Amino acid sequence: MQPQTFVFIGRSGCGKGTQAELLEENLKKNYPESPIFYLETGQGFRDFITKDSYTSKLSEKMYKMAEAQPSFLAIWMWTHMIVEKFKGNEHLFIDGTPRGYSEALVLTSAMKFYNRRATVIYINVSREWSEERLMNRGRMDDLSKEHVKKRLDWFDKDIMPAVEYFRYSPDYKFLDVNGERPIIEIHQEILQRLAA
């Protein structure tokens, strides 16, 4: 099987990580000889802010205030991982990137450089649905209504322009998937639409 590239995007709490993992399991089962490179920036940031550098301390301060990380740092977070570790023969899973329109343009330049045509899987959930999920999840960055509101505002302001860019770009296959359903239903729809 030719190496594929998948970009998972959606509001916080929409289940994009879960859907990425299910697709990864499916590929491993059906194509065990095909390696997978999984790029997840959210965990990358959570690890980064525990480090002792000047930049990581400033990043930690922003994280605790539920502020969006600056574009240059978000771009560095995933570009250095790809440059240092990507071999080119793997399926590429991108989870949690891009976080804005300018970052989407950088991702497009990377896809062209690596000669990849990515499929963007947008797990589409309402703001209200996402808010309820985040408040019930109880992760460190979801502990206050104010922090959750900031993250949802940030999605609407910064990330939605990237989603719309992907939706209309000829460089991507775009799947808009209703995420307010049982996990397995969403997974099955993704598999069906990828096979079409």
Image: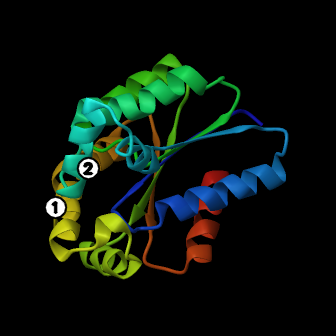
The extreme top residue here reads 113
Q: Position of residue 189 (x, y in %)?
A: 59, 67
Q: Is residue 117 left or right of residue 174?
A: right
The residue carrying mark 1 is: 153
Which colour assignment does the render follow? rainbow
Quadrant for the N terminus in the image: top right
Query: On residue 3, which mark appears?
Result: none
Q: Is residue 158 left or right of residue 196?
A: left
Q: Amino acid at mark 1?
A: Asp
Whether pointer 2 and pointer 1 mark residues with C-beta atoms closer than 8 Å, the reply is no
Q: Amino acid at mark 2?
A: Ile
- Above or below 94: residue 155: below
Q: Residues within 10 Å of mark 2 (few under 14, many from 20)?
A: many
Note whether residue 62 is visible: yes
- Above or below 192: residue 6: above
- Name the residue located 54 percent from the left edge and 80 percent from the top edge: 182
Pick the front one: 192 or 81: 81
- Name the residue located 74 percent from the left edge and 37 percent from the top edge: 35
Q: Is residue 189 left or right of residue 126?
A: right
- Above or below 31: residue 149: below
- Above or below 160: residue 151: below
Secondary structure under tag 1 reads helix
The residue carrying mark 2 is: 159
Note whether residue 68 is visible: no
Pick the front one: 153 or 44: 44
Pick the front one: 52 or 174: 52
Q: Position of residue 145 (x, y in %)?
A: 19, 76
- Name the residue located 22 percent from the left edge and 61 percent from the top edge: 151
Q: Position of residue 159 (x, y in %)?
A: 26, 49
Q: Earlier in the sequence, mark 2 or mark 1?
A: 1
Q: Is residue 195 left or right of residue 44?
A: right
- Name the residue located 17 percent from the left edge and 57 percent from the top edge: 65
